[in-house]
Image (tube, grey):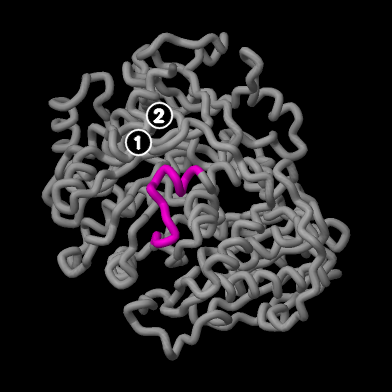
Amino acid sequence: MPVHHAVWPKRLPHALTVPKTSLWMNLHVSAMRYPDKLALVFMGQTWTYTQLRTAAELVASALRQMGVQKGDRVVLDMQNCPQLVIAHFAILRLDAVVVPVNPMNRMEELKHYILDPDAKVAVTTADLAEALAAASNALGPEQGLQHLLVTQFTDVFDAKATSADDLPEAWHPWLLARHTLPSLAGGHVHAWTTAMQTPIDLPEVTAVTDDLAVLPYTSGTTGLPKGCMHTHGTLMHNALASGLWSNGTAENRCLAVVPMFHITGMVSVMHATLFLGATLVLMPRWDRELAGRLISKWKITHWTNIPTMVIDLLGSPNLGQFDLSSLQNIGGGGAAMPEAVAQRLFEQFQLKYIEGYGLTETAAPSHTNPPDASKQQCLGIPFMSVDARVVDPETLQELPQGESGEIVISGPQVFKGYWKRPEATASAFFERDGKSYFRSGDMGRIDEEGYFFMTDRLKRMINASGFKVWPAEVEALMFKHPAIQEACIISTKDAYRGESVKAVVVLRASHKGQVSTQDIIDWCRDTMAVYKVPRVVEFAQVLPKSGSGKVMWRALQEAEWAKA
């Protein structure tokens, strides 16, 4: 018996039998079971399950008229809003393939998301439509889009009837603006309002567990982003397992603020919630004051997030006015939750922050902490149905407990390979004892109870005079400093040591102007081994973050190298 089974939630099986049906059926079944139940909340507007399913069928009918058939890849480029959920399931209703795109991408980047998956149809919001059309036009009629379906945010809510509590004033310029539809060379642009009037005329759903469902892209460390081939079965596993692991029921109220173009928001939030027949309260981007009000108003029970969101919310001057008592399950991944913040969350609100770990290739969680036996700064134990090991990245031989090596993963939620990249696929997997293991590229170790801990990305290690410095470890230590709100560790060129450690630090508002870079360095000397101490500290107003909210350490690192 694997050692981590000793801490396994007793109410749960170790592995799941995955439903053989299409992901579309999850919404369809929930609408049959709970026709009048609240499915979505956005800007004070609400949708029942019947209304959500009908809207998806209307958009699916419009997409069908645009020529979308089974297996076709359809680009979906937007922030969290009802239209994203509707369009996502509309594409699945046609047995087609969702290509989720980060809305932060610009014209040059968007070319790849049209060209690589051979997409001929895209769905987007009006604020992003011009860039998507420009990317398509640059590719030309032969390689570009044939159809672009565009929605205004206000297609789904009445701005005049929306209270200030639901719509932050800072969002008015982009959320309330009505944009002119762009032109598409050799193609057609369609308005969402027109699509919603399409008579419902749809074929039978025939997709099964092994059919391609979603093609999310992952950037990796080099080259252009690669599409990860996820089937209905790979996503279905984690949609079901995520709900079970977090004690999910149809009465969940889930705050959906992590982006749903990202695998975590898509699977662990959107699909898991709709599988249960629960309620999604949508936020298009992070705003700590709005988050506090929504948790209070809608009695949010489940909130998947990233640690920076919790840090920000706890720093709100209005924290005392928010009612967070309804929260039952709070957690996330992407970065370790600072121990001091987790402790405050528990002491002040009796909430344990449940950390997990996963990749686009593993449909979000491959590891997570047991809710009743969680550890801080920890990836958790292998998730339901997962066999995970730590191996030597050179020999691929399994390493003893406690030694750092590459985390490798086998399970039904692991993707089927990289789209059009047979060589990359081959190098990402290896066979052992009749199982296929995916190489995560992340370094970790396992403790005596079977919990996994990150040591860092294979590519991110700093070599200072032969001493290996793992940035995540130094960052976790620096979070203990009372003046530090966020920190990112990168390497800087050093004529003597080869590389030295540099810290880019965001100070808490209460400490700005009161703490110097030397104060931070001196504190670090008292807190960590000398070879880990940052030789350089730079203060920043903010750290760059990706659309999924992760700190973009690579952007800081590349900028540092460029200076050198």
Asked if residue 162 is positioned above or below residue 486 in the image, the reply reads below
Q: Is the C-beta separation of discs 2 and 1 under 8 Å?
A: yes
Q: Is residue 495 visible?
A: no
Magenta stretch: includes residue 244: yes
Identified by mark 1, the residue type is: Pro
Badge 1 is on which residue?
370
Q: Which residue: 30% across, 36% down?
A: 503
Q: Secondary structure at mark 2?
A: strand
Q: Which residue: 77% across, 69% down?
A: 63
| Residue 349 spot, x, y in % from top left | 18, 53
Q: Is 97 positioned to the left or the right of 428 in the image?
A: right
Q: Earlier in the sequence, mark 2 or mark 1?
A: 1
Query: What residue span does the magenta drawing correspond to?
Result: 241-252
Query: Number of labelled discs?
Result: 2
Q: The C terminus lies in which quarter of the figure?
A: top left
Asked if residue 64 is positioned above or below residue 356 in the image, the reply reads below
Q: Which residue: 50% across, 43% down?
A: 241
| Residue 387 spot, x, y in % from top left | 52, 24
Identified by mark 2, the residue type is: Ile
Which labelled disc corresponds to residue 381? Answer: 2
Q: Is residue 404 visible?
A: yes
Q: Residues within 10 Å of mark 2 (few under 14, many from 20)?
A: many
